């Protein structure tokens, strides 16, 4: 689920922080810059793991702050393909089941990746697995806040860096701005996947 | 900002959990407006990890477990998932290990389950007995704790 990513960056320490040890100031700045942010094609940054190398600090003309090149390692959330994860159902919609891990919300299980056959119950706005046994069809509801086990099938990174002012078509750029920078696609169409309560009662 | 290596190492839930607990205890001294992001992500991730089996693990357990998994020819990712999920049934093992029916015999799957049960503590069973049934009870206990 979590990986260690080696990165380098130039950290700017403003003069009012010069009384703190350089190490601590750098750690604080790195955490401020990266924590809870998504880096394109890398993942969701959680926290700084350690600093591997601090190079010399420079002061440039016109700016009183010191600039230090830092090599560090960061803990990043990026599940690998086909990894099994456990989360909670946040909501159901026609697009599928939205799952959340608490610290990461953009996980979607599309309708064709649900246990088959499944149908969407309009009145309760939930997806239902129609489980067939010899006795008849059981309707297994995928209620909100239920714990669900799923497999990661795909990850989508969207580059959300601002592109500058648009002269025309301002309405379209508003819609694009709502895309999340990192989202996961999951599946539960295998035995053992889906709500935990479906499989715990068997064993 | 440059990314030197985006897969330098894979971390187990336990390692991330202990790191975040350390950060949380250090961060209680100074809380500035700017640390909000770190505080948010630390809090949410700790909340998530508290409900996983990794909270009861320690480094010795983890290295013993990894050594014991040696003879089964599992990939790194599979061993990591076994450590993070602590499967208690054959169905879960089949999910975690690809083509488990071809690579492992039924006996080996049972041995793996036994190994997991022995080496890694079960968060659901305070007395250490009855894994399958206690899964349901453990679930309700956790939900009650969260409601508080």
Image (cartoon, coloured by chain):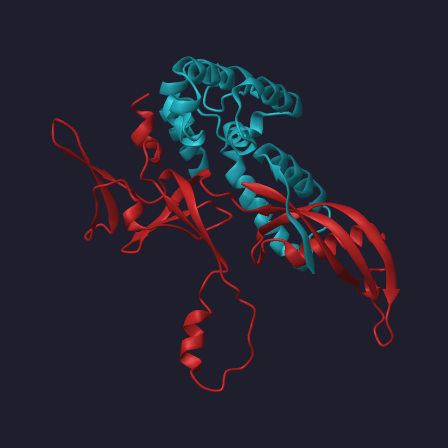
Residue at 43% from the left image edge and 41% from the top image edge: A87
In the rendered structure, the colour chosen for chain A is red
Residue at 80% from the left image edge and 58% from the top image edge: A69
How many numbered discs, if any? 0
Residue at 54% from the left image edge and 30% from the top image edge: B75
The answer to whether residue A19 of the structure is visible from this angle is no
Q: Provide residue B139's location: percent of width, then percent of height.
A: 39, 29
Chain displayed in cyan = B
Which of A40 and B62 lies nearest the eye of the viewer? A40
Quarter of the figure with the C terminus of chain A: top left
Q: Provide residue B147's location: percent of width, then percent of height.
A: 42, 39
| Residue B19 falls in image quadrant | top right
| Residue A29 falls in image quadrant | bottom right
Residue at 73% from the left image edge and 53% from the top image edge: A28
Answer with left or right where residue A135 lies relative to residue B93. Answer: left
Answer with left or right where residue A62 lies relative to residue A2. Answer: right
Q: Residue furthest bottom?
A: A167
Q: Provide residue A74's location: percent of width, then percent of height.
A: 67, 48
Which of A62 and B66 lies nearest the eye of the viewer? B66
The answer to whether residue A187 of the structure is visible from this angle is yes
Which of A186 and A129 lies nearest the eye of the viewer? A186
């Amino acid at each position: 689920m979590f990986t260690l990513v080696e990165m380098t960056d130039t950290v700017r320490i403003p003069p009012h922080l010069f009384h703190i040890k350089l190490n601590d100031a750098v750690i604080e700045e790195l955490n401020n810059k990266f924590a809870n942010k998504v880096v394109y094609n890398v993942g969701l940054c959680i926290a700084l793991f350690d600093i591997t190398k601090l190079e010399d600090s420079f002061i440039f003309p016109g700016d009183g702050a010191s600039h230090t090149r830092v090599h560090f390692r960061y803990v990043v959330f990026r599940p690998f393909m086909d990894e099994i994860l456990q989360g909670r159902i946040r909501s159901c919609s026609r697009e599928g089941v939205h799952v959340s891990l608490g610290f990461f919300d953009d996980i979607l299980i599309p309708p064709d990746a649900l246990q088959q056959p499944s149908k969407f119950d309009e009145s309760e706005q939930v997806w239902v697995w129609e489980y067939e046994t010899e006795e008849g069809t059981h309707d297994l509801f995928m209620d909100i806040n239920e714990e669900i086990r799923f497999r990661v099938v795909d990850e989508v990174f969207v580059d959300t860096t601002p592109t500058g002012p648009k002269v025309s078509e301002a309405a379209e750029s508003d819609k694009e701005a709502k895309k999340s920078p990192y989202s996961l696609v999951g599946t539960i169409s295998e035995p053992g996947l889906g709500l935990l309560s479906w499989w715990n009662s068997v064993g | 900002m440059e990314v030197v290596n985006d897969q330098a190492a894979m971390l187990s839930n336990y390692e991330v959990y202990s790191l975040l607990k350390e950060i949380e205890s250090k961060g209680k001294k100074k809380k500035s407006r700017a640390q909000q992001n770190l505080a948010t992500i630390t809090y949410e991730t700790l909340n998530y990890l508290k409900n996983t089996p990794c909270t009861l693990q320690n480094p010795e357990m983890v290295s013993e477990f990894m050594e014991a998994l040696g003879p089964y020819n599992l990939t790194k990712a599979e061993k990591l998932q076994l450590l993070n999920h602590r499967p208690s049934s054959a169905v879960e093992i089949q999910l975690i290990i690809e083509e488990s029916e071809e690579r492992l015999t039924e006996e080996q799957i049972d041995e793996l389950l036994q190994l997991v049960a022995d080496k890694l503590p079960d968060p659901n069973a305070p007395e250490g007995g009855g894994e399958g049934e206690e899964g349901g009870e453990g679930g309700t206990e956790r939900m009650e704790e969260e409601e508080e």
